[in-house]
Image: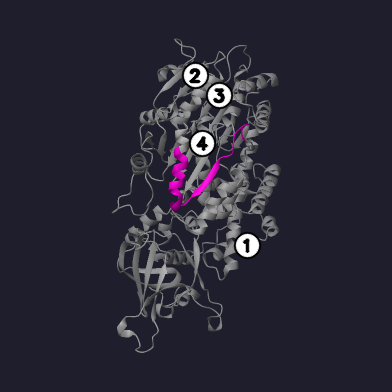
Amino acid sequence: MKLDSLLSSELRLVETQKKALLKMGISTVEDLLYYFPVRYGDTSQIKNVESLSSGDEAVVFGKISGLKISKAWVKKIPMSEGTITDDTGQIKLVWFNQPYIAKMVFEGQLVRVEGRVSARRRAKPRTELRSGTGVSEYIEDLYMSNPKIETVNNLPTAVGESLFGQSGANGKDSHTMYPVYPESKGVSSTWIYHALQKLMSKGIFDTLEEPIPADILKKYNLPGIKTAFIWIHFPKNKDNELSARKRFAFQEIFFIQLQKQKERKLWAKKSAFKIETSQKDVADFVKRFPFQATTSQIKAIDSITQDLKRGYPMSRLLEGDVGSGKTAVAATTIYAVTKSRPVGKDYGNLQTAYMVPTEILAKQHYENFCSYFEHLPLKIGLITGSECKIFPSKSDPRKPTKISRAQLLKWIANGEVPILIGTHALIQKSVMFKHLAFVIIDEQHRFGTLQRQKLTSKSANENYSVPHLLSMTATPIPRTLALTIYGDLDLTLLDQMPHGRKPIITKIILSSERDNAYREIREELKAGRQLYVICPRINEPDPTKELAIIAKSVTLEAERLQKDVFKEFAVDILHSKMTPVDKEKVMADFSSGKTQILVATSVVEVGVNVPNATMIIIEGAERFGLSQLHQLRGRVIRSNHQAYCYVFAESNSQKTRDRLKALTTAKNGFELAEFDLAQRGAGELYGRKQWGISDLAMEAIKNIKMVEASRTEAIKIVESDPEFKNYPIIRDYLKNQTDKIHFE
């Protein structure tokens, strides 16, 4: 049996299972092997209803009934209710703020519930009171609050025996841990467990080769791959599981590092324009900005201009908080590039492509760049899905003008447009540059690897086919994640804010404090300032269909604020489902001050710049990651006026308070990112789909020692053997994995 054998050729699969496996991303034997459990249950915790008592942490199997959606008596919180019954009795189940549970599970289904048992006291009925005692008597009604629930195919009467078997006298060495996998209709955890057993009995490990060199395994005390697979799917104890997870996490990060270090080596062998820059010219350009450059901006400009002189392509990530001045750094380095002539010519300019994720941001940057470069005889182009522009206009040299796409593309191909700013439209086949020397990607994590590759291959100059690459992000990235994901990039941090900027005053507002917050905001609005209000949803949820997410919506909140709270001010809305024309009009009205309050989704998170907007309300703040909250509040630090961020939390829990409190104590976005990584995990902070990394490796990224160890070993191998001639298994493994892992 081979690892790339189709599961359908090794196991009998019914149509339901085939569809479920396809949905789960499992098609081969190897896919199933690497489909790891999300957690492990313990059969020693399984109890019957009769034996439960208040305070127990227990697992109960039984039949669910009495499912309904209701509201809590006092706070009117939406909730689901039900009852689980086994052979010994029944117990009530309650899920607060989770009304969707009642629709997710069906009446009469067999389920497994896991959680804490609580008790509610109520007075005994009069008929049951003992006469003459004079003492009030109570009954304790047991219930489970917010338990984990999952459907099962059958009730395990003796789970330890029937599913995992026993060994040794009296079953002393029996497995008590059982794996719980992400499931889909037709494919349960039990099915996956038995399928793996069948594959192992067929000799699944016979052709399995160890991809990690033996000396590395020994150095870091990691189990071999065969042992690791057994321990992760069939652990006898917690040590087995942890050891296996450590090994597979190391393996994934190690191979990402190998790939990144190899890319770095190959990148350095390519040719790029050698761009000599005059320090005086650069300094003179920086002086033209309407603000004083920070020390970290000057250092970043120096690092980038030094890279441009090397003759092989720069590959650098510029990371800085919102408002730290990344655009000014980008403009200065673009100026340095445009000052250079194409090789062998005493006329013309080298070209720069600047790609951003949204039309609003593209137009904003375009306007800024027109003002930065208005004193120079340079053409600046804009290309988006809806329009094309060129600066300067023939009729008015101080303004841009709209032109046809065909005309703009012709000028770009001729090399007449040194600076082109645009959205994804930049990577269309029809866009071709004559002397593309520099590529800048703003908010680069919003673009995939393929999109970035397309942009860096847009030059028609065969001798200098690879432009210098500068990626920029305002998303604070923990050091361990940066070392892993951006192992092929040089990293530059902008860790200072422009001179004169006051720190944002952030206030965590609970429901009882809303009115006070509104009073403070009203005073600022009267003083001429403006306000963002961020909501998690666009429209109000359908009470019959979408009870899963109960959160404030843009449409209803805007209506409420206009009608009941801020009657004297103009309120408008902005969200992702609006057309580009409508979005532009709304932003123009807000930028000009025609609108004082803008209610929006997190679409304003990226790049929107309205200096007079000095306040932001974030509704349902617990639904956002700290990193996103930090970026959202960065919208209001665009001037030297005092900025305020009001974080409105729906939950009053201590956990929510502690997490949100970090917004008020962290010194900068980088510190906040590290806190969020420790508290929530990288998978929740950044999302596995964004980086193409498994949840297991994302969790391991919390461990700086593991990341540095894998990086060190990868660098050693690539330095001594970049083609992996002495490591054929590594070479083959990387080749096979390239299509599966999107190295972001």
| Callouts 1 and 2 close, C-beta under 8 Å | no
Nearer to me, 570 or 183: 570
Tell me the residue that label 3 is attached to: 352
Which amino acid is tagged 4? Val
Q: CA distance from mark 2 to mark 4?
A: 39 Å
Tell me the residue that label 1 is attached to: 223
Give x and y (percent) for residue 614: 50, 35
Tell me the residue that label 2 is attached to: 413
Q: Secondary structure at mark 2?
A: helix
Q: Earlier in the sequence, mark 1 or mark 2?
A: 1
Give x and y (percent) for residue 532: 44, 38
Residue 741 showing in the rendered view: no
Which amino acid is tagged 2? Ala
Q: Is residue 645 left or right of residue 538?
A: right
| Callouts 4 and 3 close, C-beta under 8 Å | no
Q: CA distance from mark 1 to mark 2?
A: 56 Å
Q: CA distance from mark 4 to mark 3?
A: 30 Å
